[in-house]
Amino acid sequence: MSEWRERVSGFAEAPYAYEYATLFDLISLARGKKDALIVALDHITDAGNMGAVLRSAEVVGATGVLIPNKRAAPVNEAVYRASAGAVEYLKVAREANLVSALKRLKEEDFWIAGATEHARQDIWQAPLEGRIVLVMGAEDTGLSRLVRETCDFELKLPQSGFTPSLNVAQAATAIMYEWLRRAQCTP
């Protein structure tokens, strides 16, 4: 049995306790890097979505994930399972005030990119190179007003079909891969 399956099967005997990182930890991990991605989740409360975003963030080599203390799914057994164990290789920081954390990241030369269906530019035109904080909002409400006002720019996924949007985890994954594509293509 794989190490991951052993850990997941062990949840029945003991609760999963995740040790959160701090914003300072994420900043330290990104120091000196020309390309760095932090994914900020604005009120993502569904454990399945949270775990799927964490899995994708780890796969593309994100520096970490930032969530608020309140109105966010905690990293628990369900998130661990949905992330397929990726959460063990990725720092997740919890901060009391997401807007303040985003402003602090701006001071560290990160651009704040808010994903919203109301954006004027799609991911092909958006400046997704370099040090980016990708902010994803809740599926039902999107980005909160103050978070949206804090973003340096907004972006959306191009669409050809009739369905109004993707699931937040799917959308985050598509955008993260565009960031990775550009990071790998830039000398």
Image (cartoon, rainbow, N blue to C red):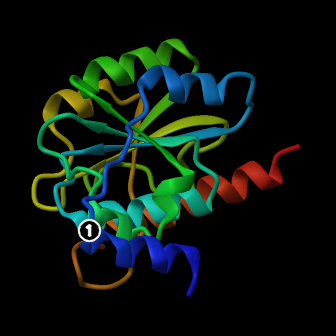
Q: Position of residue 110 (x, y in %)?
A: 54, 26
Residue for point 42% across, 15% down: 104
Structural crowding at the residue carrying mark 1, measured as other residues with C-alpha within 10 Å and reported as few (<14), some (14–19) or many (≥20): some
Tell me: residue 90, above or below residue 167.
above
Instruction: Give, as a three-letter code, the residue at label 1.
Output: Ala
Q: Nearer the viewer, residue 70 or 77?
A: 77
Residue for point 70% across, 59% down: 181
- Image label count: 1
Secondary structure state at the residue bearing disc 1: helix
Answer with left or right where residue 71 lies relative to residue 61. left
Residue for point 25% across, 59% down: 15
Quadrant (top left, top right, bottom left, bottom right) of the C terminus: top right
Q: Residue furthest top?
A: 107
Q: Residue furthest front?
A: 13
Answer with left or right where residue 91 lies relative to residue 109. left
Residue for point 32% across, 85% down: 161
Query: Which residue is under mark 1?
Result: 78
| Res. 175 in view | no
Q: Position of residue 7 (x, y in %)?
A: 44, 70
Answer with left or right where residue 180 lies relative to residue 127. right
Tell me: residue 96, above or below residue 57.
above
Q: Position of residue 24 (x, y in %)?
A: 48, 19
